[in-house]
Image (spheres, rainbow, N blue to C red):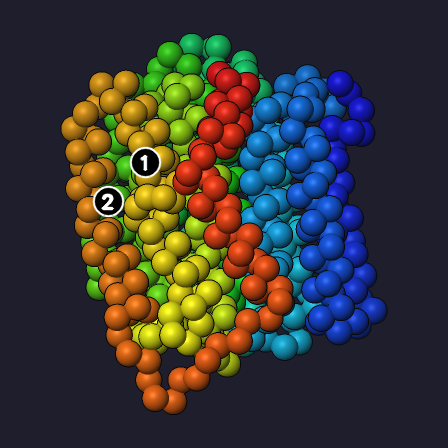
Amino acid sequence: MNSPELFCPEFALLLGALLSFACAAIGTSARTAWMVSLAAAIIAVGTSALALPYEGQPFFADIYTVDAFSQVLKLGISMALLFAIAIAQRQDSTCSQARPEVHFFFYLSSLGMMMLVSATELLTLYVALELSAYGLYILAALHRRERIGSEAAAKYILFGAAASAISLYGISLIYGATQTTYIAQIASSGGSPLLIAGIVLTLAGVLYKLAAFPVHAWAPDTYQGAPHEASVFLGTASKVAAVGLLLRVLSMAGSEAEFLRTTLIVVSVLSMSVGNLSALFQKDFKRLLGFSAVAHAGYLLLGLLCFSKLGAAAAIFYVLTYVPIVVCAFLVISAISTNGCNPSIASLAGLYKRSPLLGLVLLVAMFGLAGIPPTPGLAGKWFLFSAVIENGHLWLVLVAAINATISLYYYLMVVKAAYLAPPEDDEGEIRLSPTYAITAFVAIALVVFMGFYPAPIWTLASTAASALF
């Protein structure tokens, strides 16, 4: 198929971006801009779902590929966008003058991410990578407290600029080694030291998007300092796109994958260990989730380092189930936030009494991140561990299991604060808007459904991995 239908998800996002820009340009209220953006996001999810079976190359051959791999990840990106916009109804952590413009940057970044997972040529991939990053850079700076937002954005931009430069240098080495920028041709060109060096440098920049060690230091600071809706988008949609990008880059390794596997093993172990051990000492809830994201980047790399269809499917399954789980956590943060302040773990005291629904949402989020049944966190880790064992690295599974056990402590400390600690006397009942209540029920339903019945998501992930390999 070579027709405009291949661009249905991208067209939907472009429509959302144009409508959001128009709302901001004519000076509509923040609520009107939000409602228009939410409607466009629902359309984007619908078109992404309808476009799942599409396949083709709408441009010149091997530049931009629409297949099951790209379409499944586009569905994940559009779902993350919808959740982020739903949570953006409140926007109490966003500076007031920027509230109508926030949605435009959501759509701009999402469009870049969708192009990213379809790009099969290095220059196209790099342009899409930069397009996806610009919106995130701006979103991170829009906190109502200017100093906090500026610090978060500065760290994110500086790390992003360095990562982008490293990736671009890696791409130049890859071209020097193979005389081509087409990923399919690079994969079949045979290995050479220059090619491996180029792929490693490109990976160094790409791992920044996943918040993996050693390019992870921006994550807790940016999670903490960005507006709540920006943090949830950064913690969900960008992770889906990062997995797609990593799988595309790693597919260039061809037969020379052993050195890259060793590199990814080291990065995975350090990401899991640094993320979990650092999270143990956090008092700010958003900062804790930032270090948790570093640890989960390590888990995701377990599937990627296998260089197999099972490993790729496990990584895709894990990141797709990760989206509604993280949404649950940030929904609680946004709902209990006052004047844009970040909630501490102590401020969660008695949450189940102040709002039984939010208490349940938080419980689902922490159980999902910890991998406790009946959430899909357990199935996700099971698939990742199975892929690693099939690859002959049982010791790596033991390291991951130890790290997962460590993470139980700080996740359950959050649950303890919400369910066992008494609420403060001056803290009253939390009333949720209909949008927040619906978002909470949808997120919980998705997590529980995927936990009890992961087969449909696993089938999608396996189909995506088959298309890639």
Q: Can you give x and y, in whole percent of width and height, for residue 113 in the image? A: 59, 41
**Element assignment for label 2:** helix
Residue shown at the point (21%, 31%) measured from the top left: 397
Vertical position of residue 370 compared to residue 391: above or below: below
Residue shown at the point (40%, 65%) measured from the top left: 359
Q: Residues within 10 Å of mark 2 (few under 14, many from 20)?
A: many
Q: Residue furthest right?
A: 26
Q: Can you give x and y, in whole percent of width and height, for residue 191 in the image? A: 39, 13
Is there a contact, CB below 8 Å, between mark 2 and mark 1? yes
Residue shown at the point (69%, 31%) measured from the top left: 51
Q: Can you give x and y, in whole percent of width and height, for residue 169 in the image? A: 46, 35
The kind of residue tagged 1 is Lys
Q: Is any part of residue 274 visible from this angle?
A: yes
Q: Nearer the viewer, residue 353 or 256?
A: 353
Q: Nearer the viewer, residue 368 or 309?
A: 368
Q: Is residue 185 left or right of residue 391?
A: right
Q: Which residue is mark 1?
A: 381
Q: Is any part of residue 217 visible from this angle?
A: no
Q: Is residue 127 left or right of residue 403?
A: right
Vertical position of residue 297 compared to residue 437: above or below: above
Q: Is residue 323 left or right of residue 194?
A: right
Vertical position of residue 422 compared to residue 454: above or below: below
Label 2, label 1: how many angstroms apart (C-alpha)? Answer: 9 Å
Which quadrant would residue 101 be assigned to in this image? bottom right
Q: Which residue is mark 2?
A: 404
Which quadrant would residue 9 be assigned to in this image? top right
